[in-house]
Image (cartoon, coloured by chain):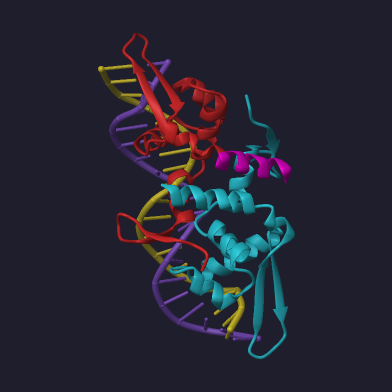
Chain colours: A red, B cyan, C purple, D yellow
DNA sequence: CAGAATCCGTCGCGATACTG
DNA sequence: CAGTATCGCGACGGATTCTG
């Protein structure tokens, strides 16, 4: 067996790959992280424009989960009109090689 | 915009990352590919033992999709009892860097 | 502008039983 | 041994409306 097994908060067995999928799996998270990592800081509505087809619900939900997991930073300005900026975090930057590989493989196919 | 956009068979816009997720997304495929890439050729029931909790349906379904996409090879021996061996394909090997990154990141967290 | 809340349909995934 | 077939649930994702 070439894999390392861990136990998650529910006592369920998870290998490293399953852990990674749990954090950045799903339809939107890798694409969101990609844009923040390579296009830089974005406001909420700028993110929407970068993600054709995403709804308010999905965007704010995914952003919140990524923020809770410490993969992105959220900076709120108390202005009128409101302004919020999202950026990749230090921890999120460690995903760059993974995101690059996902992008590279998809491009080469 | 730092991403390249393509069009899939349904005319839907997809970026490279979405393409990759379409091929190896989901709960099981990366783990299956990981084992075939690093533990070598496996028979059907050997795969089951490597994937605690997977059901017949999910295993055969995911294996078939991976085979159709050319990421794994399926070799059937006409013996009694039946014997089928699964292995990583040439194309599947190009996913090694990606799988390694998924594994590395999950391990380091 | 940047969201929260609600409702709802799809389908990914699983349990179980059956087959060559 | 190596699969199919059938059934069903629950989460994921989406449309729409409301709010500070």
On the image, the x and y values in percent for residue B101 come to 55, 48
Relative vertical location of residue B25 with respect to residue A36 in this rendering, above or below: below
Residue B51 seen by the camera: yes
Relative vertical location of residue C20 with respect to residue B20 in this rendering, above or below: below
- In the displayed orientation, state which residue is furthest to the top: A80
On the image, the x and y values in percent for residue B70 come to 71, 59
- Residue A101 on the magenta span: yes
Relative vertical location of residue A99 with respect to residue A56 in this rendering, above or below: below
Question: Which secondary structure type mostly characterizes the magenta part of the structure?
Answer: helix
Residue A28 seen by the camera: no
Q: Left or right: where does residue B49 sit relative to residue A13?
A: right
Q: Residue at x 73, y 43 (%)?
A: A108
On the image, the x and y values in percent for residue A80 come to 34, 8
Q: Left or right: where does residue B49 sit relative to residue A7?
A: right
Residue A64, by quadrant, is top left
Q: Nearer the viewer, residue B55 or A66?
A: A66
Number of numbered callouts drawn:
0
Q: Which residues are magenta?
A: A97-109
Q: Residue at x 71, y 82 (%)?
A: B77
């Amino acid at each position: 067996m070439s894999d390392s097994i861990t136990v998650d908060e529910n006592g369920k067995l998870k290998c490293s790959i399953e852990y990674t999928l749990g954090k950045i799996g799903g339809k939107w998270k890798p694409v969101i992280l990609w844009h923040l990592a390579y296009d830089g800081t974005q406001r909420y509505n700028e993110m929407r424009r970068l993600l054709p087809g995403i709804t308010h619900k999905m965007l704010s939900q995914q952003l919140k989960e990524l923020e809770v997991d410490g993969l992105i930073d959220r900076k709120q300005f108390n202005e009128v009109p409101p302004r919020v900026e999202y950026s990749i975090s230090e921890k999120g930057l460690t995903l760059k090689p993974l995101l690059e590989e996902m992008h590279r493989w998809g491009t080469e196919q």
